[in-house]
Amino acid sequence: MKPPLELHLGDVVWLRKPHPCGASDWTVVRLGADIGLRCLGCQHRILLPRSDLERRLLRIERGESATPPTDEEHATG
Ligand SMILES: [Zn+2]
């Protein structure tokens, strides 16, 4: 028994089969029964059932920043 795949928004995943655009790395943009991925080559978005993703997954890299991304980056002043 394998532990459940741990995914977080912003993680980068490499899939076994590259996208037609040539990129094989994707960013996790949505979590749920289906996992939303955005191609880093062409920004195309797909939804994959979690089980499909686990089968195609080569490796995961945690998002670069430990802090969650913020939409508000306006500096005061
Ligand atoms: Zn692509």
Image (cartoon, grey):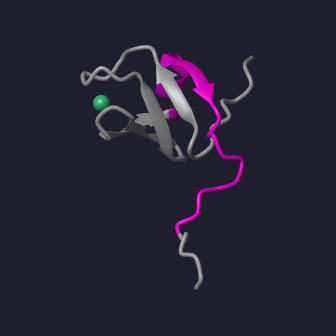
In the shown orientation, is residue 1 left or right of residue 32?
A: right
- Of 60 and 66, the residue lying toward us: 66
- Of 1 and 10, the residue lying toward us: 10
Residue at 30 percent across and 39 percent down: it is 44
In the shown orientation, is residue 40 left or right of residue 10?
A: left
Find residue 15 and report its horizontal and vertical position in percent: 46, 20
Find residue 48 and report its horizontal and vertical position in percent: 42, 34
Quadrant (top left, top right, bottom left, bottom right) of the C terminus: bottom right
Magenta-colored span: 50-71
Q: From the viewer's perspective, is residue 49 above or below residue 29?
A: above
Indicate whether residue 74 is drawn in magenta.
no
> Which residue sits furthest front?
77
User: Which quadrant contains ligand 1?
Assistant: top left
Find residue 46 and report its horizontal and vertical position in percent: 35, 38
In the shown orientation, is residue 47 left or right of residue 10?
A: left
Q: How many numbered badges does the structure rendering display?
A: 0
Residue at 31 percent across and 23 percent down: it is 19
Indicate whether residue 65 is drawn in magenta.
yes
Q: To which quarter of the image does residue 38 belong?
A: top left
Q: From the viewer's perspective, is residue 30 above or below residue 41?
A: below
Quadrant (top left, top right, bottom left, bottom right) of the N terminus: top right
Residue at 47 percent across and 25 percent down: it is 52
Find residue 18 and report its horizontal and vertical position in percent: 35, 18
Residue at 54 percent across and 47 percent down: it is 32
> Which residue sits furthest bottom?
77
- Of 24 and 4, the residue lying toward us: 24
